């Protein structure tokens, strides 16, 4: 199975900050890397697919990068509605594993 | 509007069974692969099961294989997860998710239904 390791597990930031979250796969997953935003009591929301493609309707302050096994999600100019948990997921092969999540909190 | 609504959660004793439903609207299950994903209290998302758009392939996480079965009713446009031999560690919010094949990502999710396994 492919293991997905995210860092950090949590971070504190202020509105307007630039935030970067890292995700590492235990083996190469080509471009099959997605990012989701998850808020308590709400359905997860797809932000980025295929490493760097922005899902329709997602603000351009969200961006994804990386290749092979190392990937990043960057939020440029954190907004109040961005405080949430973010997780990566590989869709390269079953089981379609998720990272453990990064909780972004208000400083 | 594309939407997924789960139901069927509840409290069940260890060793018991439960059937979860996921009603789809705004699209047809016969055109998309579907997944079940769960989140245990205080934990991250865990992928559970997959069914291909034509129903011909089904995959399961090791933790549920042999105990859970994913299926669907095309006429009802509803996805199911039959769970048996339930354990305390199956306690979680269970969500269904639609896979958009062109992008290999889960583009639509339901809000989930809570399953608690406890005596």
Image (cartoon, coloured by chain):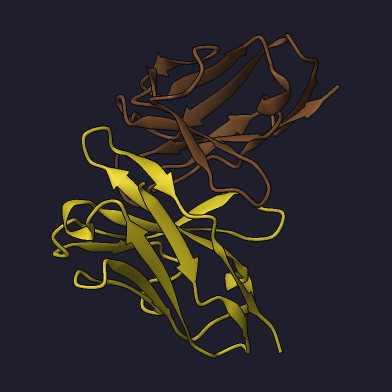
- Residue found 77% across the figure and 14% down from its top: A15
- Tell me: residue A85, above or below residue B63: above
- Residue found 60% across the figure and 22% down from its top: A21
What is the number of callouts on the image? 0
Q: Which chain is yellow?
A: B
Residue B36 screen position, x and y as percent: 41, 60
- Tell me: residue A79, above or below residue B66: above
Extreme residue in the front direction: B1
Residue B5 screen position, x and y as percent: 45, 61
Residue A14 falls in image quadrant: top right
Q: For this view, does B10 lie left or right of residue B84?
A: right
Q: In the picture, which quadrant includes the C terminus of chain A?
A: top right
Q: For this view, does B15 lie left or right of residue A14?
A: left
Q: For this view, does B110 lie left or right of residue B54?
A: right
Residue B88 falls in image quadrant: bottom right
- Residue found 41% across the figure and 79% down from its top: B67
Compare residues B2 and A64 and report the one nearer the observer: B2
Residue A39 falls in image quadrant: top right
Residue A71 screen position, x and y as percent: 47, 21
Q: Which chain is brown?
A: A
Residue A17 screen position, x and y as percent: 73, 9
- Tell me: residue B92, above or below residue A7: below
């Amino acid at each position: 199975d492919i293991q997905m390791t995210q860092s950090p597990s949590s971070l504190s930031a202020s509105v307007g900050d630039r935030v970067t979250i890292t995700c590492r796969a235990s083996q190469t997953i080509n471009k099959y890397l997605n990012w989701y935003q998850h808020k308590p009591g709400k359905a997860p929301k797809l932000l980025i697919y295929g490493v760097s493609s922005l899902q329709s309707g997602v603000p351009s302050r969200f961006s994804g990068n990386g290749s092979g096994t190392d990937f990043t999600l960057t939020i440029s100019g954190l907004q109040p509605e961005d405080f949430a948990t973010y997780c990566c997921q590989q869709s390269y092969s079953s089981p379609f594993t998720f990272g453990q999540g990064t909780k972004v909190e208000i400083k | 509007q594309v939407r997924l609504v789960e139901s069927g959660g509840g409290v069940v004793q260890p060793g018991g069974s439960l059937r979860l439903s996921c009603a789809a609207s705004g699209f047809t299950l016969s055109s998309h692969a579907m997944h079940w994903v769960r989140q245990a209290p205080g934990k991250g998302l865990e992928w559970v099961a997959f069914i291909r758009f034509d129903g011909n392939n089904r995959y399961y996480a090791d933790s549920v294989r042999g105990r859970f079965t994913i299926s669907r009713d095309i006429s009802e446009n509803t996805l199911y997860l039959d769970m048996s031999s339930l354990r305390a560690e199956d306690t979680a919010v269970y969500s269904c998710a639609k896979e958009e094949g062109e992008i290999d990502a889960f583009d639509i999710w339901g809000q989930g239904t809570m399953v608690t396994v406890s005596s």
